[in-house]
Amino acid sequence: MFKHILFATDGSSASEHASQMAINMARVHGSHLTVVYVIDPYPYMGGGEMNLVGFESYMESGRKHAAKAFAHINHLASVGGVPVEVKTRLVEKSSVVKAILETAEEEHAKLILLGSHGRGGLERLLIGSVAAKVVAQSTKPVMVIR
């Protein structure tokens, strides 16, 4: 049914739980799995000179978090049953929701899967849940894992 699943992760505990569900869904449906990790743009790029050391440190931290999340998912995909083909995508975009939706289109995903509580705190209070926005804006089926 779902021959290509896009799984959006931010490396959080909610994504950790959802990653196992993504692997299981891919196994059951014989699906390809694309995993996307979105790095928010460097927050201090406003007026004035940009601190290149701060920017590189920020981006390196984002790449390390993504690599850790990707490694975990690749490990899950290779153990416990039929191996799952996993493709990883690291995206830098100002809107996490837009990045997820655009990646789903680019990859021709048939299902978007994500955890319900990842990014949170003040950001969640101010702009709402990423999962809720993906559900509201997606033209593709979305599965949200709690």
Image (tube, rainbow, N blue to C red):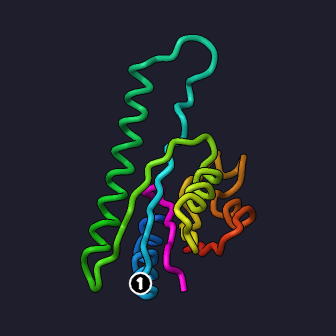
Q: Quadrant of residue 34?
A: bottom left
Instruction: Give the x, y percent position of residue 97.
Output: 64, 54
**Picture residue at 56% right of the left edge, 25% below the top:** 44
**Picture residue at 46% right of the left edge, 82% below the top:** 25
Q: Determine whether 81 is above or below 107 in the image.
A: below
**Picture residue at 30% right of the left edge, 66% below the top:** 74
On the picture, is 128 further left or further right than 88?
right
Q: Quadrant of residue 103?
A: bottom right
Extent of the magenta region:
1-12
| Residue hosting label 1 | 30
- Residue 5: within the magenta? yes
On the picture, is 8 further left or further right than 46?
left
SS of the residue under disc 1: loop
As drawn, which residue projects farthest toward the left? 79
**Picture residue at 25% right of the left edge, 78% below the top:** 79
Q: Determine whether 140 is above or below 35 in the image.
A: below
Closer to the camera in the image, 85 or 35: 85
Instruction: Give the x, y percent position of residue 115.
Output: 54, 67
- Residue 72: within the magenta? no
Q: Determine whether 65 is above or below 74 in the image.
A: above
Instruction: Give the x, y percent position of residue 141.
Output: 65, 75
Residue type at the position of mark 1: Gly
Total numbered badges shown on the rendered structure: 1
Quarter the C terminus occupies: bottom right
Quarter the N terminus occupies: bottom right
As drawn, which residue projects farthest toward the right? 136
On the picture, is 131 further left or further right than 12?
right
Instruction: Give the x, y percent position of residue 4.
Output: 49, 74
Closer to the camera in the image, 85 or 134: 85
